[in-house]
Image (spheres, grey):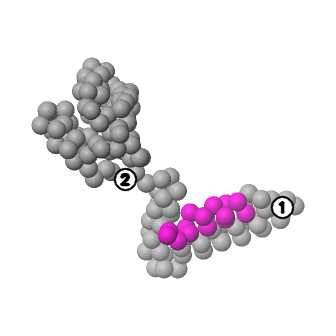
Amino acid sequence: MTVRAYVSHVASNRFRLRIPDKRGLDDYFQALGQVLAARAEVSAVEVNPRTASVLLCHDGSLDLATLARQAREQGWFELDLAAPQHPSLDVLVSQQLRQFDDSLRRWSNARLNNPSLIFVFFTIFLFRELAKGHVAPPALTLLWYLYELLNRPRS
């Protein structure tokens, strides 16, 4: 079985590898850390078996393609140079809101969407609060701002 690895973080003169299949295997990460630390262009190696990661600090001359080839040849791992992209929380929430909006439009034959649903909710809430003699705009204002923030156009 080929062990898959990917680059999760890149900065000048360092990068972090993730090897999820070997999570928790102290012996594997210690041995891999020693092999990588022996490379001339590597200045420091930090391994963390609990997070399945290897942080490599180098002098700037370390080539990922060469490292990937050598790791594959020596049987350590298969490095996927196209690292998976993990979207941020606001992107995930925004995607879910768009999917909900699309479903709502299909279900209502394009009569309802997220803003109209929020408008209906605010209107009902407004009359409910007015009937009680309460005025509570800060929470509603913040909710609306949050909605606007999550649905802003991406640049």
User: From the viewer's perspective, is residue 62 above or below residue 36?
Assistant: below
Callout 2 amino acid? Gln
Q: Residue at x 83, y 65 (%)?
A: 130
- Element at badge 2? loop
In the image: residue 137, left or right of residue 54: right
Which residue does the numbered mark 2 point to in the structure image?
Answer: 85
Q: Most prominent secondary structure in the magenta stretch?
A: helix
Which residue does the numbered mark 1 point to in the structure image?
Answer: 135
In the image: residue 60, left or right of residue 133: left
- Element at badge 1? loop
Q: Which residues are magenta?
A: 141-155
Q: Residue at x 19, y 32 (%)?
A: 76
Residue placed furthest toward the right: 133
The answer to which of 13 and 111 lies nearer the viewer is: 13
In the image: residue 150, left or right of residue 124: left
Task: Give the CA distance from mark 2 to mark 1.
Answer: 44 Å
Q: Position of residue 92 (x, y in %)?
A: 47, 56
In the image: residue 16, left or right of residue 4: right
Q: Position of residue 50 (x, y in %)?
A: 38, 27
The reply to whether residue 80 is in sight is no
- The image's mark for residue 83 is none
Local crowd at mark 2 within 10 Å, few (<14), some, or many (≥20)? Answer: few
Q: Quadrant of residue 56?
A: top left
Callout 1 amino acid? Val
Q: Position of residue 155 (x, y in %)?
A: 49, 70
